[in-house]
Amino acid sequence: MWGNAFLLSALYLLVGVVVEGALRLFPSKFLQRLSLSLDSLPARALELVGAMEPLRTAFFNGRIPEYGVRLIFGLTTVAVIFLLALVVGTVMGSLRYLIARGMRRGGGNGP
C-alpha cells in the first residue's frame, strides 16, 4: 500500500515537473491546460481545508514566491495520494478480513 502510494505520488510529481519544464520551453495552450488540470487536485484539497485563500493572498502580496506555491502544491498532492491510498487500503483490508472471517465461520461451503 505504501509502495503504491509513493509510486503514484512520485509519478504525479514527475509529470508535473515535466509539464512545467515543457511549458517554460514551449508555451502552448495544451500545456497550460495540462498544468492547470494537474494543479486542480491540490488546489481543491487546500480549498477544502480553508488554506487556499490565505495562500492565494500571500502569493499575490509577494510573501510567497512561485516555487513556494509549487512546493506547497506538491506536498499537498503527496498527502492527498497517501491519504487516498490509506483509505482504499483500509477498506480493502477490512473487506478481506470480513470475507475470511465469514469463510471460517461458514466453512466456505456453498448452499
Image (tube, rainbow, N blue to C red):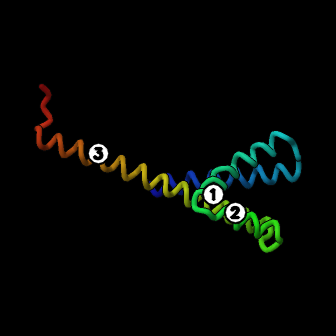
Q: CA distance from mark 2 to mark 1?
A: 7 Å
Q: Secondary structure beneath disc 3?
A: helix
Q: Which is nearer the N-term, disc 2 or disc 1?
A: 1
Which one is earlier in the sequence, the residue at label 1 or at label 3?
1
Task: Give the x, y percent position of residue 89.
Answer: 40, 51
- Mark 3, Cα crowd under 10 Å, few <14 / some 14-19 / many 20+, is few
Give the amino acid at mark 1.
Answer: Glu
Q: Circle 1: is it few (<14), some (14-19), or many (20+) Cα within 10 Å?
A: some
Q: Residue at x 25, y 48 (%)?
A: 97
For the residues marked 2 and 3, what is the alpha-carbon distance in whole angstroms? 41 Å
> Which residue is at a point 75% across and 48% down the rendered structure image?
35
Q: Which mark is residue 96?
A: 3
Circles 2 and 1 in contact, beta carbons < 8 Å: yes
Mark 2 burial class by Cα count in 10 Å: few <14, some 14-19, many 20+: few
Query: Which numbered disc, 2 or 3, marks the residue closer to the eye?
Result: 2
Q: Secondary structure at mark 1?
A: helix
Q: Amino acid at mark 2?
A: Glu
Where is mark 2, residue-wise?
53
Which amino acid type is marked by label 3? Arg
Q: CA distance from mark 1 to mark 3?
A: 34 Å
Quadrant in the picture for residue 46: bottom right
Q: Secondary structure at mark 2?
A: helix
Q: Quadrant of the C terminus?
A: top left
**Which residue occupies 11% across, 43% down?**
105
Q: Quadrant of residue 100?
A: top left
- Residue ID at (74%, 55%): 17
Rendered view: 12 above or below 52: above
Number of numbered discs: 3
Question: In this image, 48 relative to 15: left or right?
Answer: left
Q: Check the image and report above or below for 12 versus 54.
A: above
The residue singled out by tag 1 in the image is: 47
